[in-house]
């Protein structure tokens, strides 16, 4: 199966590194023009130079901070005044780790703005063109913790669950317009985010980060954590024409880690 996204325009959040970077690289390799969206301008400039543009793509970037919604709103609104997209990958940096007893209502409000409010607002802007064009793909980068909560990620567990249920509701409403909406439930991947969380866990447990990583890998049936490029392959398929009948789903990519159905 040959996936071609030639002529398609994509907007990918959190794309200066990790999973967002891997998704952006694969979309570009498949022919899409990609707009990167993240905080680190230098990394995005470098990534654009490295991304495939052999099929005539024009890649660009937006400097945004999802954790400051009002400032983010101005940037993304300005972008959509002169741009349209066919593919939207909703992905942001994660909120601070910690258990439910460590967080207060302001923490939850901040996580809501970061993980939910920015996603809904961006999607509303992107949908106008998709509905007119009768074609669109929306991917929400979520977590396996929406099915099996991780006690050290209370904020993420809570707000990502809201994103997933919102995505399911949206999928029903826009299916008649040829638009699919799917959520990818992320397991353990080799990213800076995992490394940071493991370092904090190691400090609390009085062990090394390497021991935390080893224990994490042991929990996964495949006995390893995922490679970001593997994530990019899944998303590229889901946004392709070949996946036109897949919508409203929550797809785990976790090496078999989830025990629930």
Image (cartoon, rainbow, N blue to C red):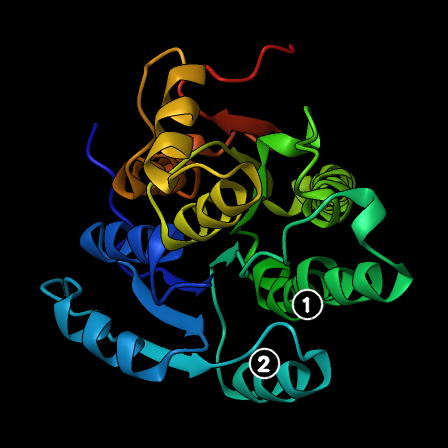
Q: Distance of mark 1 from mark 2, alpha carbons?
A: 9 Å
In the visual, does 14 lie left or right of 7?
Answer: right
Which of the two labelled residues, at mark 1 and mark 2, occupies the earlier sequence position? 2
As drawn, 135 above or below 223: below
Q: Is residue 249 above or below residue 22?
A: above
Q: Is residue 45 left or right of residue 234?
A: left
Left of 185 or right of it: where is 15?
Answer: left
The answer to which quarter of the image holds residue 261 is top right
Q: Which residue is mark 2?
A: 76
Which residue shows up at 74% across the image and 50% down it?
Answer: 155
Residue 180 occupies quadrant: top right
Q: Position of residue 109 (x, y in %)?
A: 83, 64
**Closest to the observer: 188 or 66?**
188
Q: Which mark is residue 145?
A: none
User: Badge 1: how crowded within 10 Å, few (<14), some, or many (20+)?
Assistant: many
User: Dividing the picture into quarters, in which one does residue 233 lie?
Assistant: top left
Residue 248 visible in the snapshot: no
Residue 6's place in the image compared with 147, above or below, is below
- Image coords of residue 247 (percent x, y): 60, 33
Crowding around mark 2 (Cα neighbors within 10 Å: few <14, some 14 to 19, many 20+) is some
Give the residue number, with chain letter if any, for mark 1: 118
Tell me whether the residue at label 1 lies in contact with that at label 2, contact meaning CB atoms closer than 8 angstroms: yes
Element type where label 1 sits in the image: helix
Name of the residue lying farthest toward the front: 206
Residue 50 x/y as whole percent? 13, 68
- Residue shown at 71% from the left, 68% from the top: 121
In this rendering, the label closer to the viewer, 1 or 2: 1
Instruction: Where is residue 163? Give x, y as percent.
Output: 72, 47
Residue 46 can be seen, yes or no? yes
Q: Secondary structure at mark 2?
A: helix
């Amino acid at each position: 199966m040959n996936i071609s996204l030639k002529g398609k325009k994509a907007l990918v959040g959190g794309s200066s590194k990790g999973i967002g970077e891997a998704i952006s690289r694969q979309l570009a390799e498949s022919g899409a023009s990609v707009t990167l969206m993240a905080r680190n301008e230098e990394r995005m400039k470098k990534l654009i130079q490295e991304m495939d543009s052999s099929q005539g793509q024009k890649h660009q970037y937006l400097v945004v901070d999802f954790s400051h919604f009002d400032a983010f709103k101005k940037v993304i609104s300005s972008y959509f005044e002169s741009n349209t997209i066919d593919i939207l990958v909703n992905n942001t940096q994660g909120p601070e780790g910690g258990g439910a007893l460590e967080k207060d209502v302001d923490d939850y409000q901040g996580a809501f703005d970061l993980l939910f409010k920015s996603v809904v607002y961006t999607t509303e802007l992107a949908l106008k063109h998709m509905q007119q064009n009768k074609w669109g793909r929306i991917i929400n980068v979520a977590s396996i913790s929406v099915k099996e909560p991780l006690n050290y990620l209370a904020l993420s567990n809570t707000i990502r669950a809201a994103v997933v249920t919102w995505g399911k509701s949206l999928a029903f409403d826009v299916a008649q317009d040829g638009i699919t909406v799917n959520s990818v439930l992320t397991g353990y991947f080799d990213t800076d985010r995992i490394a940071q969380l493991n370092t904090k866990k190691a400090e609390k447990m009085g062990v090394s980060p390497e021991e935390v990583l080893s224990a994490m890998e042991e929990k996964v049936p495949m006995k390893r954590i995922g490679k970001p490029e593997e994530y990019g392959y899944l998303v590229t398929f889901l946004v392709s024409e070949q996946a036109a009948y897949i919508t409203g789903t929550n797809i785990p990519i976790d090496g078999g880690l989830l025990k629930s159905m």
